[in-house]
Image (tube, grey):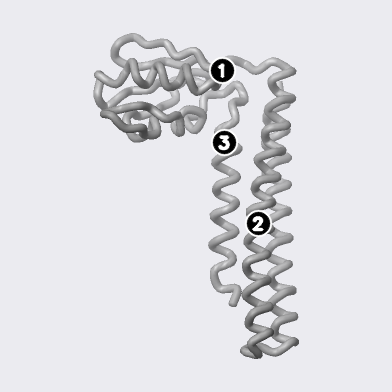
Amino acid sequence: MLANIKEELQKAKEHLHNELAKLQVGRANPAIVEGVIVLAYGSTQPLKNVASVSILDAQTLSIQPWDKGLIRDIDKAITEANLGLNPQNNGESIMIKIPTPTEERRRELVKIASRIAEDGKVAVRNIRQDYKKKIDTAKAEKTISEDIAKGFEQDLQKYIDEAIKWIDSDTKIKEEEIMKL
């Protein structure tokens, strides 16, 4: 009955980890811009589908479009994404210097990280709710006994507690990383 719960919780954890990685903490990270939506060939696509993003040094990203004709569209999309980044277009590629965040911006990023963590916890709680309904339905239909249902509920809670603990730990690490000068 709880066969797929580990997979679902792992997906929720990975999503949280990816969202936290997007937070700009003064170091170059391709995840900051890979999800920027670019208008290319008459449709919208994530940046990672139209260009390669690489790290030149600790504070510089290089974006190399696969089609040089898209360089202006990519430049415009990054500017309009309100990421606080200033793309430099040299005609061949786009360079982005990642600025060191101010104390105020760091505190704001910590709040954003907390909101992302809370969204992750909500996703985990929704998974718990779905599995609890499955257990209750099986119990009501008499396909499992009360004792087996109780065992499933305890296992379910154990998995959920582990996931919440992981979310708190990952968020704490990210918050420390943000606040580190």
Query: Which image quadrant is residue 180 in?
Result: top right
Q: Is residue 130 above or below residue 86?
A: below
Question: Regarding mark 2 in the picture, which secondary structure is present there?
Answer: helix
**Mark toward the viewer: 3 or 2:** 2
Residue 91 position in % (x across, y down): 30, 11
* Distance (Cα) linking label 3 and label 2: 19 Å
- Determine which residue is flagged by label 3: 21
- How crowded pointer 2 is (Cα within 10 Å; few <14, some 14-19, many 20+) is rated as many
Residue 124 is marked as 2
Query: In the image shown, does 89 or 58 lie closer to the viewer?
Result: 89
Residue 136 position in % (x across, y down): 68, 78
Question: Regarding mark 1 in the picture, which secondary structure is present there?
Answer: loop
Query: Which image quadrant is residue 153 in?
Result: bottom right
Q: Is residue 167 left or right of residue 63?
A: right
- The tag earlier along the polypeptide, 1 or 2, is 1
- The tag earlier along the polypeptide, 3 or 2, is 3
- How crowded pointer 1 is (Cα within 10 Å; few <14, some 14-19, many 20+) is rated as few
**Mark toward the viewer: 3 or 1:** 1
User: Residue at 41% of width from left, 27% of height from top?
Assistant: 54
Tally of marks: 3
Q: Amino acid at mark 1?
A: Gly
Q: Quadrant of the N terminus?
A: bottom right
Q: Is residue 121 above or below residue 6?
A: above
Q: Amino acid at mark 2?
A: Val
Residue 84 is marked as 1
